[in-house]
Amino acid sequence: MADKRPKTAVFAYSEVGFVCLKELIFDGADVAVVFTHRDDPGEEHWFGSVEEFALAHDILVRTDDKLNEGSAALLRSLDVELIWSFYYRAIIGPEILSIPRLGSYNMHGSLLPKYRGRACVNWAIINGEETTGATLHAMNVYADRGDIVDQEAISIDIDDTSLSVSQKIADAARAVLSRSYAAIESGAPNLTPQDETKATKFGRRTPSDGLIDWNKSAVEIYNLVRALTHPFPGAFAVIDGQKTYIWRARPLDGPQSEPGKIVSKNPLIFATGDGLLEVTSFQPDGESERSLKI
């Protein structure tokens, strides 16, 4: 007779949450409850539904806006022995983290200790990184600072967007989980402390952070555009007095001119701090998106 799997609670959302929950379920994990979020109607939803997948497999689902004593009481009543967190957006506090005898583990979308915090994929692209990845780590009261179980790197190619990088990270997260959960369920994971001397941390971003600074280089502006394009809120500028979203662009070599100046309308090209940026898809606020041929 096979050993009984530990009772597990999964806190999950977005594509990483979806693929990791699938990995656990398809491997026969004993998932007693899934905590997830209601979809925000103001966001573009490109990822699988954690809630729908869990319900389809007859798993109890909670969509609590905030975790509280009731959440902790439920976990205790279910005799939860292990907690997984996969892109869950709410803070999981010490009262809950202290419940499972096998500990609590989180999947983070960077190669920790780099890019701790929110919006790690967006920030990595904005900063021109060529590599990022997925990290599974033990959870403690300090966000993203627990000991590392495993990591997998992925490339950030020059034409990648936050969506394509997020999809790569989801694949990496599934692979990391696949080769890690047996050791964690047995209570004997191989843990490596994070190197604090290499740690970086970035905060959450808001739509207003998408404002383009034309004094920056063409590559820096291009990185901002591809980091914030669909399904994210978008980089934007005020063009002819109107807020305009720039969804796709590419840097060009060219003569120096006044940053922000339109040097060509067909094709649509702007001067930047060190060269030119051709805009190939844009959207004046309140209007339809317009794509231009390259």
Image (cartoon, grey):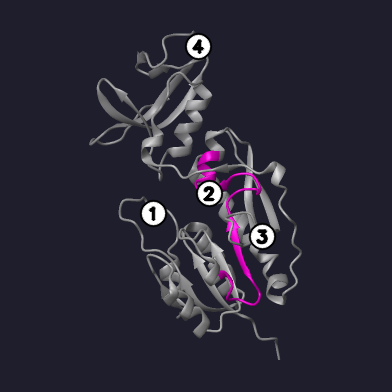
Quarter of the image holding residue 144?
Answer: bottom right
Q: Residue 234: x and y, percent?
A: 38, 37
Q: Nearer the viewer, mark 3 or mark 4?
A: 3
The magenta-colored residue range is 97-123
Q: Earlier in the sequence, mark 2 or mark 4?
A: 2
Q: Is residue 29 above or below residue 42?
A: below
Residue assigned mark 2:
166
| Residue type (three-letter) at the residue carrying disc 3 | Val
**Mark 1, residue position:** 45
Of the 4 image quadrants, the one containing the N terminus is bottom right
Task: Please tell me whether residue 150 is drawn above or below residue 165 in the rendered image.
Answer: below
Give the residue number, with chain letter if any, for mark 3. Answer: 176
Mark 4 falls on what kind of element?
loop
Quick one: label 1, few (<14), some, or many (20+) residues within 10 Å? Answer: some
Earlier residue among tags 4 and 1:
1
Q: CA distance from mark 3 to mark 4?
A: 44 Å
Q: Earlier in the sequence, mark 3 or mark 2?
A: 2
* Mark 2 touches mark 1? (CB < 8 Å): no
**Residue 87 disc label:** none
Q: Secondary structure at mark 1?
A: loop
Residue at coordinates 52% horizontally, 26% vertically from top-left?
220
